[in-house]
Image: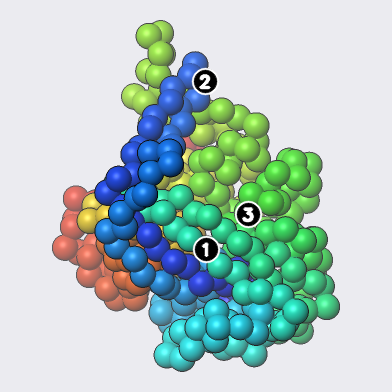
Amino acid sequence: MFDVITIGSATMDVFVESDDANIVSVDSVNKKSEFMSYPYGAKIEINEFSSRVGGGGVNTACNFANLGFKTSAIFKIGKDIYSDGILNFFGNKNVDLSNIIQDESLSTGFSIILVSFQGDRTVLAHRGANAKIKKSDINFEAIKESKFLYIAPLNGDSTKVLDDIVNFASENEVNICINAGSSSIKKGFNYLKRILENAHIVVMNKDEASIATQIQVRPDSKEEKFSEEFIHPDIISMLNKLKVKDYQVIVITDGSNGAYAFDGKKYYKCPIFDSPVISTLGAGDAFASTFCAALARLGIDIGSALMYASVNSSGVCSQFGATQGLLTFEQIEEKLKQNPQFKYYVKGK
C-alpha cells in the first residue's frame, strides 16, 4: 500500500535564459496580460543553459517522497534517450516506478523553458507520451490500495481517463487532490464540475480558475480599488463557484500575490514566502502537493497548510530546476520559526 499515488506528466526540460528577453505588459478595461518577447529576426545570446527532469507527475512524486510519504508515480514515457534520463533521475528519489508506462512507439515529453530575468518562464511543450495515457495503462488496483491520489494536470487524449480515475478512486474511498490542467478546464465548467465533485482538494492558479469559471479579475479603476480589499471580489466569486461540494477545500494561487483558500465557511489568504527567485518552474507543483501533504500528514489548519506550501514553493523558486530546492517538513518548520512575521490571514464565519 502506498500513502500517495501521483498521476501526471514526465518530461525532459531544457532551460534557456537570456537577458535579451523583454517583459511587455498590456492593460485593457477588464484584463492585464504580460508577454515575453524577443527582437524579431535577431540572433539571441543565451546566458544560461541546462537540462532537468520535470513534469507534474515527476515533480509532485518527488515532493511527496521528500516529505516522507511512501509514493508511487503513474506517468507515460517512450523508450528513447529522454526516457533513460528520466528513469536515471529517479535513482535516489525513493519513488516507486512499478506503475509507470513505457511505449516505444511514442516519444518522451520534452519542453524548452524560456526563463526571463525576473525568474518567470514561458514553456514550449511537446507532450509526446504524456498526452497518450489510456485506461488500460492504469493500475487501478494500486490506486484502490493507496491512501490518497494526487492528480497533476493531464493533457491531450490523457484527459479521457480522468473521469474513470476520479470515479474509481471516489468509489473506493481514496482521497483525491487535483490540480486540473488546461486541457480539462477548456472542456467547460459542466465537464469540470463532474471531476471536481469527487475531489477533496482542488488547486488552480488564477488564470486557470478564470478560464474554468469564466470570471475575469478586474483591475483597479478610478471608481473601485479592488486591490485594497482582503481578497479581490472576483477571486472570491471564483472560489465560491469552484466549490461544488461541502467537504471540499478550494485553493487559488496568484503568483507574487500569494494564495487563497475557501472551505465553505472561511476565506484564507497567504502571502508568498520571501526568497530569491531564480526560476518559478515547478513552484506550482510544489505548492499544491505540499498543501495536500500538510493537511494529510500534519492535521494542521488550512491557513498553516498554505504557509507550509508557500515556504516549500519558495525553495523551488530559489534554485534552477523544478525539483531542486524541495524541503522536508522539518526544514519548512525551521524556516517558519526563523520568520515569525510570516503569517496567513483569515475571514469568515
Q: Which residue is mark 1?
A: 111
Q: Amino acid at mark 1?
A: Ser
* Mark number displayed over residue 180: 3
Find the distance from the CA under tag 3 to the CA under tag 2: 24 Å
Say whether marks 3 and 2 touch (CB < 8 Å).
no
Find the distance from the CA under tag 3 to the CA under tag 1: 19 Å
Q: Which residue is mark 2?
A: 30
Q: Quadrant of residue 238?
A: top right
Identify the residue shown where x is 24% and y is 62%: 336
Q: How many marks?
A: 3
Query: Within 10 angstroms of label 3, few (less than 14), some, or many (20 or more) residues?
Result: many
Q: Secondary structure at mark 1?
A: strand
Q: Nearer the viewer, residue 197 or 325?
A: 325
Q: Secondary structure at mark 3?
A: loop
Left or right, 326 with reference to 183: left
Q: In the rendered image of this protein, does residue 39 appear above or below residue 203?
A: above
Residue 185 image position (x, y, % from top left):
68, 46
Q: Secondary structure at mark 2?
A: loop
Identify the residue shown where x is 77% and y is 61%: 157
Q: Quadrant of the N terminus?
A: bottom right
**Observer able to see residue 21:** yes
Left or right, 327 with reference to 137: left
Say whether marks 3 and 1 touch (CB < 8 Å).
no
